[in-house]
Image (cartoon, grey):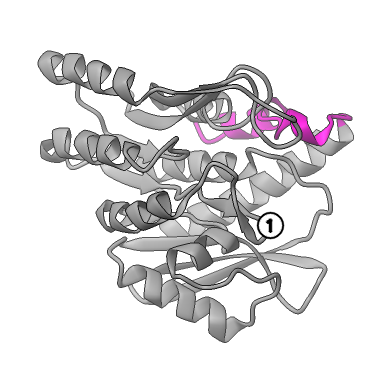
Amino acid sequence: MIKNCIAIHDLCCYAKSSLTVVIPTLESLGVEVLPLPTALLSSQSDGFSSPYMKNLTEELDRVLDVWENENIKCDSIYSGFLASYDQVRIVKRVIKSQEKQNPLIVIDPVLGDNLHPYSSIDDKLIESMKSLISYADVICPNATEAALLLGEEPKKIYNEREVESFLNRLVTMGPKKVVITSLLTKDSNTVTTVSINNGVIHYHHNQRIENSYPGTGDLFASVLTGLLLKDYNFERACDICSTLCSKALVNTHEAGYKRRHGISVASIISYLDTFN
């Protein structure tokens, strides 16, 4: 039986991020995607001067009315970008409606990057996100998002003591497992992914790649969700995600894509297929 995933993310009509990353990634891993678009965007926001965005909260409630009436079931729930703090209620509604299924719940607390919140993120959404992550089996913030969730000022470089404090404090907020991505340490040539599971902390180091592309975090969380649905060990899954994201960054750059194009999932489809 093919497993499925309710994916609660925005939909960009141009450029690769959110659902245009989530859907091909999970489907390549053999997971059927049930998309719940939180917003419709003309493009992803990074690199575009004034993208159009339509908040779809009202439409989401109507979709969920039908799904609940039809008794739609899922194996996993994966939430990403939320267009407003009110959409935290939507995600909680989805979780509540599926609780008898005991789905895997992965929450990517999309709040910011590069030391700053995204332009659409306000204090209400950050506070609401703190309550949402308590429902998660897994959360996967980047370093900036981890700091925002903990009420800390994001910074560029973290030492091991600070990283491990972040992990332990995030676990006390409710999620069972935490992985923090895009961490920079004193070694400027290395980017680190670090996770915690049952009190055990696991590090994965990759060579730092100067070129960055929107949607890389969506790729990481999508691969992680797919691998966990296939019963991969959590630490092993995090290692695979880190390696594949690095490969995708290199391949996207070598293909000549501009940064605002976003990460190229197509460039690693052949690798994803090996896990199917």
Residue 112 falls left or right of residue 266:
left
Q: In this rendering, is residue 25 above or below 136?
A: above
Q: Is residue 274 magenta?
A: yes
**Residue 129 percent coordinates (x, y):** 37, 53
> In the rendered structure, which segment of residues is drawn in magenta?
255-276
Residue 127 falls left or right of residue 235:
left
Residue 168 occupies which quadrant of the picture? bottom left
Residue at the spot x=66%, y=71% of the render?
155
Residue 70 occupies which quadrant of the picture? top left
Residue at the spot x=65%, y=28% of the render?
16
In this view of the protein, which residue sits in the foreground, 190 or 217? 217
**Residue 231 percent coordinates (x, y):** 36, 46
Disc 1: which residue: 114
**Residue 273 percent coordinates (x, y):** 57, 29
Residue at the spot x=75%, y=42% of the render?
249
Disc tally is 1
Q: In this rendering, is residue 137 above or below 204?
A: above
Which three-letter amino acid code belongs to the residue tagged 1? Answer: Asn
* Residue furthest out toward the bottom: 161
Residue 143 is at least partly visible in this image: yes
Residue 229 falls left or right of residue 218:
left
In this view of the protein, which residue sits in the foreground, 257 or 119? 119
Q: Is residue 75 magenta?
A: no
**Residue 256 percent coordinates (x, y):** 89, 30
In this view of the protein, which residue sits in the foreground, 144 or 186? 144
Q: In this rendering, is residue 186 above or below 47?
A: below
Classed neighbour count for the residue bearing mark 1: other residues with Cα under 10 Å, few (<14), some (14–19), many (≥20): some
Q: In this rendering, is residue 215 above or below 44?
A: below
Residue at the spot x=27%, y=64% of the render?
174
In this view of the protein, which residue sits in the foreground, 50 or 143? 50
Residue 15 occupies which quadrant of the picture? top right
Residue 240 is at least partly visible in this image: no
